[in-house]
Image: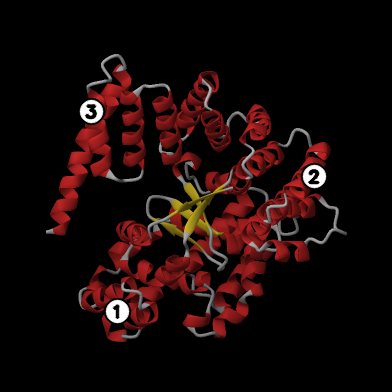
Amino acid sequence: MKTYYLHILRFLTRLWKFSLLIAVCITLPSLATAQSLLRDTEIEQTLRAYTNPILRAANLNTSSVDMYLVNDKTLNAFVTRGQNIFIHTGLILEAENPNQLKGVIAHESGHIAAGHLVRRDRSNRSAYGSMLIAAGIGIAAILAGEGQAGASILAGSQQFGVLDALAHSRINEASADQAAAKYMEKTGQSGRGLLEFFEKFRYQEVLSNARRYPYFRGHPLSSDRIDKLREITGESIYKNVKDTDEELHQMVMMKAKLTGFLDAPQTVFSKYPKTDTSKPARYARAIAHYRAADLKNAITSIDSLIKDEPNNPYFHELKGQIYYESGKGELAIAPFQEAVRLMPSAPLLEIALAQVLIERGSPELNEKAIAHLKSALRKEGTNGFAWYQLSQAYDRKNEPALARYAIAEQAFAMGDYYRAKSFALRAQSGLVAYRAQKRRASDIIVIAEIQLAKQKNRRR
């Protein structure tokens, strides 16, 4: 599992562009506490297995909807314009079964399919005229670190149209509920998960906004919504359909992995004592032992899982990670190679293997690393870490132009247009023999110049 830290202000600036002002006001307090995004092949694959059928039922292109896992234990999920779904780790850990998690994902998909964020932009413009001054003060207060004061300014004045905007939000929430039930019906699944989720947190309705979970600040809950959803889901012929054994297993393994990585080791050992010999318990304990620098017990635990499931790529990946991050890179190669062999379609696994191969230093392993990184980038071309690793491999190969080009791609993927332009310019003269990379470097220069000009104009 990898963590990629976000620059909060930069992220909020992007969110401002993606969503309407009132959506930012609602979700901003929770986003400000989210420090990082997590990347993990196993969890991403599980979430995709749950989500893609729902997206197809919503007539959405699965490859056009991006999902992000936010390292935040608060209960929350939200969408932004550009078809992005954000899931907090807290939501996964709080969901009691896959159907509940799917219900929330179906609800968020309903917002995307209905274009609620775009339409809310348009429908609320009339309310924004007198609200902008107060909103500007509120946003400034939040960005200055005064979150509660800023939220109070944003939400406290009826005359600025906030209540009108929230009324539209309540309508959209009911619409997304109905859409979620329809999507679950079309996929032959019960829609009761979302109902169970809402009923579990029904008490949130009587709490003040400051005390509610972030999810219920951005998704107003009401008895009417719950009653209507109960009526809709109760009419479905699939209302009693249960999660499959495979889905339940995926869920408990995902929870065990998150607990192992995010909780303190002693907390993990308390939740998953030695007497529990189930796979999820051994998985969580293997991670906890590794995080507690107990290499012997970590390897013993993960080896027991590999013995049970020798064709599980995620167990081999974890073993490689344990060895690598314990300073035993030479022992990490074999398990990472096995993980890639078992799941060659996963770019994160190839990137992890390439990183180890590069650090071993031999020209032969370096060439293999370059091949794996190129393969990973064909699947995930905007992975900045992969481009950085590729630059390191080219540098070891004494290919400075290609190394600079890779850095230009990394900077471009991260939105650092000044650095992208700088390295693309420095790479160009040495890329004569690499026509594809030379053309791409030229494109980066042109696009970076346009973006830098736009940034300059906005500052004015």
Q: Quadrant of residue 276?
A: bottom right
Q: In this view, which residue lies farthest toward the left?
A: 460
Q: Which residue is mark 3?
A: 442
Secondary element under disc 3, as helix, strand or loop, is: helix
Query: Marks 2 and 1: in contact by CB < 8 Å?
Result: no
x then y, percent, for residue 25: 36, 72
Mark 2: amino acid: Thr
Asked whether residue 243 appears in the rendered view, the answer is no
Asked whether residue 216 appears in the rendered view, the answer is yes
Vertical placement of 315 versus 100: above or below? above
Q: Residue at x 53, y 32 (%)?
A: 359
Q: Which residue is mark 2?
A: 300
Which callout, 2 or 3, points at the residue further toward the start of the chain? 2
Q: How many residues crowd around disc 3 within 10 Å: few (fewer than 14), some, or many (20 or more)? A: some
From mark 1 to mark 2, how far is it between C-alphas?
Answer: 61 Å
Mark 3: amino acid: Ser
Q: Is residue 102 left or right of residue 179?
A: right
Secondary element under disc 1, as helix, strand or loop, is: loop
Which labelled disc corresponds to residue 69?
Answer: none
**Of labels 1 and 3, the one closer to you:** 3
Q: Residue at x 53, y 78 (%)?
A: 212
Q: How many residues crowd around disc 1 within 10 Å: few (fewer than 14), some, or many (20 or more)? A: some
x then y, percent, for residue 296: 77, 46
Vertical placement of 10 versus 412: above or below? below
Q: Looking at the image, which is closer to me, 67 or 43?
A: 43
x then y, percent, for residue 311: 75, 33
Q: How many residues crowd around disc 2 within 10 Å: few (fewer than 14), some, or many (20 or more)? A: some
Q: Which residue is mark 1?
A: 161
Mark 1: amino acid: Gly
Q: Residue at x 36, y 28 (%)?
A: 403
x then y, percent, for residue 48: 58, 45
Which callout, 1 or 2, points at the residue further toward the start of the chain? 1
